[in-house]
Amino acid sequence: MKVVVVAGIPGSGSTTVLKGALVDLDYVHVNYGDVMLEIAKSKDLVTERDQMRKLSPDMQKEVQREAAQSIRKRALENNIIVDTHCTIKTPLGFLPGLPPWVLEELKPDQFVLIEADGDEILLRRITDTTRTRDMEKLDDINLHQQMNRSVSMAYAALTGATVKIIQNHDDQLDETVEEMKNTL
Amino acid sequence: MKVVVVAGIPGSGSTTVLKGALVDLDYVHVNYGDVMLEIAKSKDLVTERDQMRKLSPDMQKEVQREAAQSIRKRALENNIIVDTHCTIKTPLGFLPGLPPWVLEELKPDQFVLIEADGDEILLRRITDTTRTRDMEKLDDINLHQQMNRSVSMAYAALTGATVKIIQNHDDQLDETVEEMKNTL
Amino acid sequence: MKVVVVAGIPGSGSTTVLKGALVDLDYVHVNYGDVMLEIAKSKDLVTERDQMRKLSPDMQKEVQREAAQSIRKRALENNIIVDTHCTIKTPLGFLPGLPPWVLEELKPDQFVLIEADGDEILLRRITDTTRTRDMEKLDDINLHQQMNRSVSMAYAALTGATVKIIQNHDDQLDETVEEMKNTL
């Protein structure tokens, strides 16, 4: 069975595309952050999500590693889709979402990057009133997508996994979902 | 002696440039796919090239690894040029041509990427009637070249090898060959 | 304590930005090349900087590795800023400044890339009469910055470190220095 990592920056619509594609496919869909939370709870490190950030870096790293291990284990029985981020934008810079201690345990077979044009993402973020998001400039959005492409090719070089890039343009969700299905 | 990897997407003219440069240089020119085929034949896994794709992923990986080993061995006596792909475009995404199990054995000293403008490549593919090639759009061609740059920098980070990018524009083959010679 | 790598191509102004930021911060500033020179001198391999290039590749590699080790050691007591290059442009191509044998010892926590627009860099190089620099074309400058972004994401994937990109535009040094301080 295979482990597929699906990622996209906020506003790329990666979760929407993924949900659309999974209707017809036999994959178990896991969110990396949720798995980390479960593990931290089971170890009595936290009781709720907000406390995760307050764990020491070493502890976060360990939880992150165990989450990868647990996901890879589930792939013995099912194809797995992991919903996560290629990089997380932090004040210290782009933080790789799949550092070595994750990649080694997760052993992903495929990366799928959901992208859209920078201006599409900008507009989606502005009109999405369900979440409060930091407003980024167009240049920053484009840079984030570019860095995700680069880091995903580095993940590929480190694992031998493939990297598929899927454009999720406005008013073309059906086509995008179809492309996602074919890719999976 | 050194191992140089030369790569370019279809239509970049990498093989033409390479042949032009090797006239005056003392390098052994090997094609990665050919070496893999030889090895698979010698192990009685296949009798012809078309059967290579039908090998199990594990078997392909093993053949790929042994090909790297065999090429590195030849570098004890000669400078070697390996003709291969940085990434192969597949329905599942860009597949790295030099995954970890290849890089570790091949230990390349230098990568040379032959590129051309997207529209030059498009036109070369259209007018090349000797091969049937899937027709890609300009954006796809540009993306493929961009991903090859990224992955080659990842290969560089993993091995310490240099990455040289050479533009092979129309009507400038002599200059390109000259640049290739100076690089080797 | 952390190890931060700061890099920028010639003309990006990375050293100026760094010096401005370090006035108010408690970091030890080391130049990678200087540390290598010290080590080579202490081993009686060279007596002056110019001789460094003439060391055998294996010897250079060993000195490079020991420099990383020595810098990481100093981080036991201080936050360290390492002034170096993501890639060095050589006739053989872009040479990674932090190959595996350096990354493994240096274990950087953060990369900061100082960039500027290609034309700003071009003009700064032309008007800088204190150094003789090879004049590069705009395309080459842009390519070098692009390759540095790619390789830094590969370094990030290999180490888990963050990558911050800071633009150092003309007449905005104060803002750039401020951003640098916030990043550190």
Image (cartoon, coloured by chain):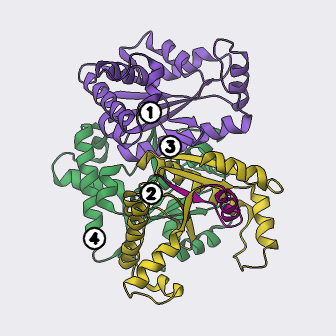
Chain colours: A yellow, B purple, C green
Mark 2 or mark 4, which is nearer the start of the sequence?
4
Q: Is residue C124 left or right of residue A42?
A: right
Q: Which chain does tag 2 point to? A: C
Q: Which residue is mark 3?
A: B151
Front residue of A96/B42: it is B42
Look at the image and give the residue range highlighted in magenta.
Answer: A1-25
Q: Quadrant of the N terminus of chain B?
A: top left
Residue C96, visible in the rendered structure: no
> What residue type is disc 1 on?
Phe
Are the residues at dot 2 and dot 1 in contact (C-beta closer than 8 Å)? Answer: no
Identify the residue at image location x=74%, y=58%: A118
Q: CA distance from mark 1 to mark 4?
A: 35 Å
Q: Which residue is mark 2?
A: C157
Same chain check for tags 4 and 2: yes
In percent of width and height, residue C182 lies at: 55, 77
Q: Is residue B63 left or right of residue B111?
A: left
Q: Which chain does tag 3 point to? A: B
Q: Which residue is mark 1?
A: B111
> What residue type is disc 4 on?
Arg
In percent of width and height, residue C177 lies at: 57, 71
Q: Which residue is mark 4?
A: C74
Q: Which chain does tag 1 point to? A: B
Q: Nearer the viewer, mark 3 or mark 4?
A: 3
> What residue type is disc 3 on?
Val
